[in-house]
Amino acid sequence: MMARSRLRPSSSRLYWLALALVVKGLFFCWYLTQTYKHDIDGFWGQSNGDMMTYIQPVEELLLHHGFKTDDRMPGYSGVYLAFRLLFSPAVACNIIIVLQLLLAVVSVYALGLVARDLFQSERAFYWAYFIYLFSPFASVFDGYFLTESFAASVSIFFLYAWIRFEQNPDRRLPLLVAGAWLTWSVFLKPAHLPLLAIPVAVWTIRWLRGRLVFRQLARYSFTFLLPFLIVDGAWMVRNYRQYGEVIPLLKNPWYANTFWPTNYFDMVAFCQTYGEDFAFWFPNTDLRWLMGWGNNRYLPPLRWYVDEQLGPPPAYVYTSKFNRDSMIQIRELYFELGNNPNIDSLRKQMLESQVRAKLGRYTRSVREDNPLVYYVWSPVRYLFTFLHGTWGYSFLDDMIPAHWPRLLLRLYHYALVLIPGLIGLVLLLRRGWRKNDILLFLPMALGYCVFVYAFALRHAETRYLVPFYPFLVLSAVSVFTAIRSRRPTQQPSLYDLSFRHSADL
């Protein structure tokens, strides 16, 4: 009992932080020894095609050419700039991934505290802390020069600050801090913008039920949104001066066409009709076959420890407008585009036009003649891909040759997070609607995540789930804590605390 009392969440902060640092730090160090792509000499971590798009605008700015970026928000580049002013590019990048690790360490402890306060159980702290600590789903991104690690930590810090406000609504600073964290999340990933509306929606539900007066609803909403209004207002001024247009977030949601292979977006639109992954750098995607690539022929230094068997789209995709032979013809045309060194510009333009026209007809025919595939099967496939995990990243398919460790990682994801998490969403909706309305944030946020990436954008790369992964862990924890009857606690529940909002009526 004495040992347990010494390790209580609130009284053993240094212990929990040190444990998280040891576990995540060991994984971080091992991961850095396995990385294989470094866009900058001297950079320790892993990079991919996105890295230079965050760095180049800053380097241009330091050369007095202005901050030139049409497809990136400054939330990540700004951090790079802060260190780049003092250090070389490689050192600045190394400092950033170390900072990502340290924030991730703190976020593990913060997530445990969030679980304890949400579910009013110290057991919830242990579940959330250890599940998130030992999951590689988010940890792999601590060593990447990408926004995912920061975004996942920010999601936890935002929720922690919001709960601190809910426990004492007379203090507005935690609410302002919560808004600031979520503002940074939007400036890391602009697709997160609608998350700003969810706390406002929760307070609106509370107001409709008579637990808040309108003055409180307006004040809470304004305080929470104030950081975003200020920062995005400044960003809009910058965009107006740069482009002469009112642009709240990004001018272009995709890289310029010159960044991608020829006819890439034509192939993307076709793949989206039946839910196929269009990341040609991942193995076993139909787009790789369509581009004329052979099995296990990856662009160096990429590597994958999976069995690749490329082939044309499945038979159920075909319509009266095209068949397997049609796709083989497209593949042959595209192969000539990319592999004939003697092709002249006129022939190249003709082939590009042919590929674009044919793929356009095939895309329309699937949408019009095979609506079950387009409107049902395609979103279902993307949903499974999104939650199960695309190759690489979170399950180390590009790091570990042996199959069994990667299988264990997927079993961990399914058994401790995904399956109980999906069940927990239903429980949270019920409990949130009946008792503790702040719990509604979790299913609303995860529902938005799934809708926008799997259904609306049909761009279900699993790394986009990483910032929402802590919410899925909390959802799973709600199931584990409900399985066993909880002992009564002396802490007031957030449901009881919510009535404190009526104190200044």
Image (spheres, grey):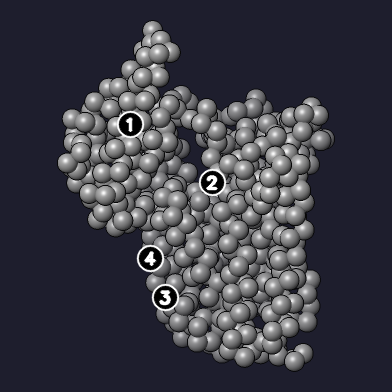
What is the crowding at mark 2: few (fewer than 14 residues within 10 Å), some, or many (at least 20)? Answer: many
Residues at marks 4 and 2 touching, judged by CB atoms closer than 8 Å: no
Disc 2/disc 1 C-alpha distance (Å): 41 Å
| Residue 323 picture location, percent across and down | 18, 36
**What number of labels is visible?**
4
Of mark 3 and mark 4, the one earlier in the sequence is 4
Of mark 4 and mark 2, the one earlier in the sequence is 2
What is the crowding at mark 1: few (fewer than 14 residues within 10 Å), some, or many (at least 20)? Answer: few
Residue occupied by mark 4: 419
Of mark 2 and mark 3, the one earlier in the sequence is 2
As drawn, the label of residue 357 is 1
Instruction: Report the front residue among 421 and 325.
Output: 325
Disc 3/disc 4 C-alpha distance (Å): 12 Å
Identify the amino acid type marked 4.
Ile
Mark in the foreground, 1 or 4: 1
* Rendered residue at 53%/46% (across/down): 140
Disc 1/disc 3 C-alpha distance (Å): 45 Å
Disc 2/disc 3 C-alpha distance (Å): 29 Å
User: Relative to residue 124, is residue 230 depicted above or below?
Assistant: above
Identify the amino acid type marked 3.
Val
Instruction: Report the front residue among 327 and 422.
Output: 327
